[in-house]
Amino acid sequence: MKKILMIGAMIAALSATACTSQTSFGDCIGVDDTEDPALKYSVDTGNVILGVVFIETIFVPAVVLLDEFKCPTGKRFSPPDAPLQD
């Protein structure tokens, strides 16, 4: 019983603090989602760590990869007449 309570407390603490689903530039995206060409994206380290810690559950890593893997970190700079590039 004590072990179950400890695991439950750990899950509640990590889910309340570690998981990022959006930033001030917009929502995070999954692996297969298309990126907005006007924004820069980077892999969210907190979400990856959360997925690795809970790898045995299969559910948490799946949610992280499919829904919250990359988060926008800023806007891309482009001159007014130039097309957007990577």
Image: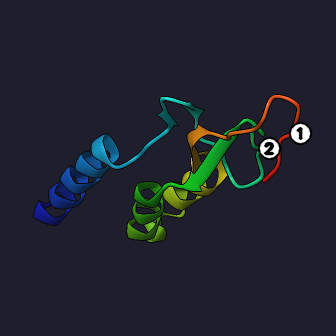
Which mark is nearer the camera, 1 or 2?
A: 1
Which mark, by number, is residue 52? none
Residue 6 is situated, as x and y percent measured from the top left of the image, at: 16, 59
Q: Which numbered tag is attached to residue 83?
A: 1
Q: In the image shown, does 27 or 84 lie closer to the viewer?
A: 84
Helix, strand or loop under label 2: loop
- Which comes before the other along the chain, label 1 or label 2? 2
Q: Amino acid at mark 1?
A: Pro
Whether residue 23 is situated above or below residue 50 in the rendered picture:
above
The residue labelled by disc 2 is 34
Residue 74, relative to residue 65: is it above or below? above
User: Which quadrant is home to the N terminus?
Assistant: bottom left
Which amino acid, mark 2?
Thr
Q: Quadrant of residue 49?
A: bottom left
Instruction: Count residues near mark 2 (Cα–Cα under 10 Å), then give few for <14, some for 14-19, many for 20+.
Output: few
Q: Is residue 17 left or right of residue 50?
A: left
Picture layout, residue 86 above or below residue 77: below
Instruction: Say which residue appears at 19% left-offset and 51% top-offset.
Output: 9
User: What whole-number distance in Å separates the C-alpha atoms at marks 1 and 2?
Assistant: 18 Å
Q: Position of residue 25 (x, y in %)?
A: 55, 31
Report x, y in % for residue 74: 56, 39
Please tell me which residue is depicted at 40% across the width and 56% down the height of the picture. Answer: 46
**View extreme (left): residue:** 2
| Viewer-proximal residue among 68 and 25 | 25
The image shows residue 59 at horizontal and vertical percentages of 53, 56
